[in-house]
Structure formats: C-alpha cells, structure tokens
Amino acid sequence: MDKSKRLFVKSKKSIRRRSPLIQSGDQIDYKNLNLLFKLITREGKILSRRVNKLTLKQQRFITIAIKQARILSLLPFVNSSTFLPNAKKKYGKSESITRTRTPVLKKKIWKKSS
C-alpha cells in the first residue's frame, strides 16, 4: 500500500459498550419508578433510544409507562428541585426579584398620499 492510501485507513479502536439499563428480568411498568427515573433527563424529558440502548419495542413500552406514571402523578411532567435533591438552581439570585421591561414605543412614519 502506498502512502496516499494509508492516510484513509481507520484505526480499530475498542468500543466500550455500556451495560443496558433494562435487564432480562426487569419489568417495564409505570409502577417501576427506579427504572423510569433512569430513563428521563433532569428536565423530565424521555431519553432517546440511542442514548438508552433499547430496542424499538422496549422504547415504546418505556414511553407508555412514563406517560402513565405522569398522568397518575407518580412522575413529574417537569422536574424541579423538589424531585431532584441534587439539582441546583439555575440562577443564584432569589426568585422574588423580578425585572420589568419598559415598553418600547416605535414611531410610526406616515406618508402623505398625493
């Protein structure tokens, strides 16, 4: 092989696979809150199939289970600091301080019609 072709050969790196979150004995159900909390983000969004390393069928069941748990108030729709004790507030300032905007007045330019 000459040098020009050697530049494009990819090196074989070992790919480290994570162990799947769902084991063979785990039950995908809305009552299994420990499993469901692993499959949502800090904001309460459902993680994608690629991130979770799930099959399509498992992802569908997970989505249905999370939605059922939200409707039954077992999971929050939007996570806040009450549900996540380690979550930090976004801003260090107290929430009582509010900023008000002054209204911006735009001048209208009237054209005379002739």
Image (cartoon, grey):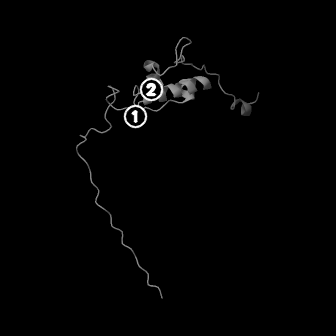
Is residue 9 shown to the viewer in this render? yes
Image mark count: 2
- Asked whether, in this view, residue 51 is left or right of residue 111, the answer is right
- Residue 51 lies in what quarter of the image? top right
Residue 111: horizontal and vertical position, in percent? 44, 81
Residue 80: horizontal and vertical position, in percent? 35, 32
Is residue 55 shown to the viewer in this render? no
Q: Nearer the viewer, mark 2 or mark 1?
A: 2
User: Mark 2 vs mark 1: which is more N-terminal?
Assistant: 2
* Within-10-Å neighbours for mark 2: few <14, some 14–19, many 20+: many
Instruction: Check disc 2 and report the residue beneath it.
Output: 69
* Within-10-Å neighbours for mark 1: few <14, some 14–19, many 20+: few
Toward the front, the furthest residue is: 72
50 in relation to 16, above or below: below
Residue 8: horizontal and vertical position, in percent? 69, 32
Q: Amino acid at mark 1?
A: Val
- Asked whether, in this view, residue 34 is left or right of residue 9, the answer is left
Q: Could you say which is closer to the camera, residue 88 or residue 40?
A: 40
Q: Could you say which is closer to the camera, residue 35 or residue 5?
A: 35
- Label 1 sits on a secondary structure element that is loop
Toward the top, the furthest residue is: 25
The residues bearing labels 2 and 1 have C-alpha atoms spaced at a distance of: 13 Å
Q: Amino acid at mark 2?
A: Ala
Residue 96: horizontal and vertical position, in percent? 22, 43
- Residue 101 lies in what quarter of the image? bottom left
Residue 78 got which mark? Answer: 1
- Label 2 sits on a secondary structure element that is helix
Toward the bottom, the furthest residue is: 114
